[in-house]
Image (cartoon, rainbow, N blue to C red):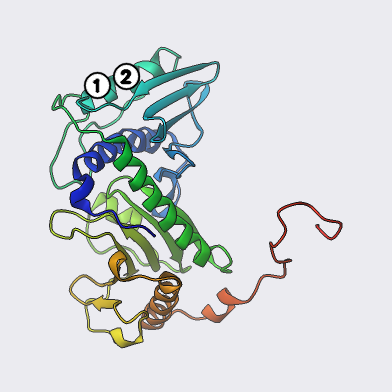
Amino acid sequence: MHMLRHSEWADTKLTLHLVSQILGKIKLGLALQQPQWAHVTLPLTVSGFSTGPLYGGGRWFEIEVDVLTSEITVQVEGSRAVILLADGTSIKSYYDAIVWALESSGVTVRINPKSQEMAETRWLDRNETPLAYDADAAQKGLQLFRDAAREQAMFLAPLRCRKVMPALFWGTFDVSSLIVYNAHEPFPKDLVIEQAAFDEPMIEFGFWLGDASVDVPTFFILPYPFQYTELPSERLQPADAYYDAAMSECFLSLEHTADGDVQAFFRTSFDLLSERLGWEGCDHYFLPLKMPAQSQQEPTDESP
């Protein structure tokens, strides 16, 4: 994976984060609810990220942020609107254009316009501060997300267990995935987001782009229930991976990864945390699938 430090594209990253909040909040109001908020994540696409197909006002529609063409597309049955991603455009302007494109095609949306899970609160429907947009930086950021999602999918896809495959979590603007253990484990505090996110034992595999205090993107692995106690970091691979008891997370900086390191980090972290959580039957997760290897790009006589 290539390196892109937070400081190299912080302003453009903020713009994409805010735009993702508009898409995510629209999806929050319309997608059928699933545990762990899985219904509100934004799938990554070849060119950016999307709401995926949504149904509202008797119509199917989809909104996609395309960083390869620097466009936001709003596609409703029978119509398609294009909004340019451009340097100096405010989040209010993006919000107004997306809402107008939907409502002019018969889709009415109502969202809470207050930004969510961000260090600084911004109102999506009224903040007129000009935002930066660097198309080249946005494309490099997308490549990071896609590579991270690929690493997560390579680990999770063959596992015989309940899981949420990698997607963009727009609140925190990271690409994450989950392995969920079938038991009830209610969150102990009366917090809306956390009560729905954390009500079953799980292990989250994530990729975070960094911030002003941590400039380098980082893979993280978080158990629930949280484990605020020392665990043996020496069991983790590669050597630069570590467990932070204060955060209840395993970490691996992108700066310290070579080929194969991320997969080793995922497996050793899973083994450590699943044992700590007392999960039973995990050996079954890793039984090989009884399927032919995907070595052929074209159909053959042996293809099923």
Q: Which residue does the image show at 41% across and 12% down from the upper left?
A: 104
Toward the top, the furthest residue is 104
Location of mark 1 (residue): 93
Residue 116 position, x and y percent, is: 23, 43
Mark 1: secondary structure = helix
At label 1, the amino acid type is: Ser
Q: Which residue is rendered at x = 21% and y = 52% of the image?
A: 6
Judging depth in this view, the residue of 50 and 36 nearest the camera is 50
Count of all numbered marks drawn on residues in the image: 2
In the structure shown, which secondary structural element does the residue marked by tag 2 occupy? helix
Q: Check the image and name the residue furthest to the right.
A: 301
Q: Residue 97, which numbered label? A: 2
Looking at the picture, how far across and down is residue 236, in whole percent?
Answer: 35, 82
Q: Residue at x 38, y 64 (%)?
A: 204
Looking at the picture, does residue 160 appear above or below residue 122? below
Query: In which quadrant is the N terminus drawn?
Result: bottom left
Q: Nearer the viewer, residue 94 or 102?
A: 94
Q: Is residue 13 above or below residue 266?
A: above
Are the residues at dot 2 and dot 1 in contact (C-beta closer than 8 Å)? yes
Q: Residue at x 36, y 42 (%)?
A: 139
Q: CA distance from mark 2 to mark 1?
A: 6 Å
